[in-house]
Image (spheres, helix red, strand yellow):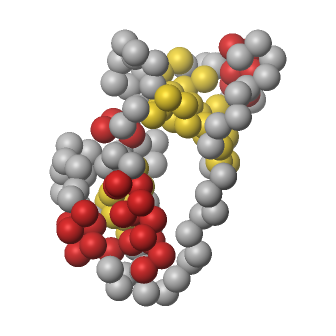
Amino acid sequence: MPKPPTPSTNGHAMLAEAQRLHGRGYAVVPCNGKRAIVAGWNEKRLTSGELREALDGTQLNIAIALNQSDLIDVECDSPEAEPNLQELFGGEISPTPTWQSKRGKHRLFRRPPGLPPRPSWKSTVSSSASATARGR
């Protein structure tokens, strides 16, 4: 698994990671904290030059606009959600990028064909195909 970028105070590591993700086809969004700094970020994929202009020499964060990718974020944000997701996977959840938020675990999966833009399974597992810079 690739090593995460080393934090820096001049933005070069973040810019390098943004360029790497952009090169893999992802719509990278520069953020101040969790807030996108680019208007229309959820509808437009920035160019490599626009990313450089926004991130070079800064201490900004980045996000990926999932609505412009082949990924979905499945969030388990209730006590019953994690066991329900495990049940959907037959007892063992496939290894996938995972992180913990205040509300629960998030996992990235490839978007299945035919899945609506923002599917949601309330009371068990919720999924977001459109990450927002402000959070869910």
How many numbered marks have been drawn onto this rendered protein structure?
0
Give the percent coordinates (x, y) of residue 100. 67, 48
Give the percent coordinates (x, y) of residue 42. 26, 45
Could you say which quadrant of the image residue 63 lies in?
A: bottom left
Q: Nearer the viewer, residue 116 or 23?
A: 23
- Whether residue 134 is visible here, answered yes or no, is no
Residue at 37% x, 81% y: name it: 58
Give the percent coordinates (x, y) of residue 60. 40, 73
Residue at 60% x, 64% y: name it: 4
Could you say which quadrant of the image residue 38 lies in?
A: bottom left
Decide if residue 4 is on the left or right side of residue 72.
right
- Whether residue 88 is visible here, answered yes or no, is yes
Is 80 placed above or below 39 here?
Answer: above
Residue at 60% x, 23% y: name it: 125
Could you say which quadrant of the image residue 43 lies in?
A: top left
Residue at 42% x, 80% y: name it: 11
Is 120 placed above or below 14 here?
Answer: above
Decide if residue 77 is on the left or right side of residue 26.
right
Q: Nearer the viewer, residue 22 or 42?
A: 22
Give the percent coordinates (x, y) of residue 124. 64, 19
Q: Residue furthest right?
A: 91
Q: Nearer the viewer, residue 122 or 105?
A: 105
Q: Nearer the viewer, residue 86 or 124?
A: 86
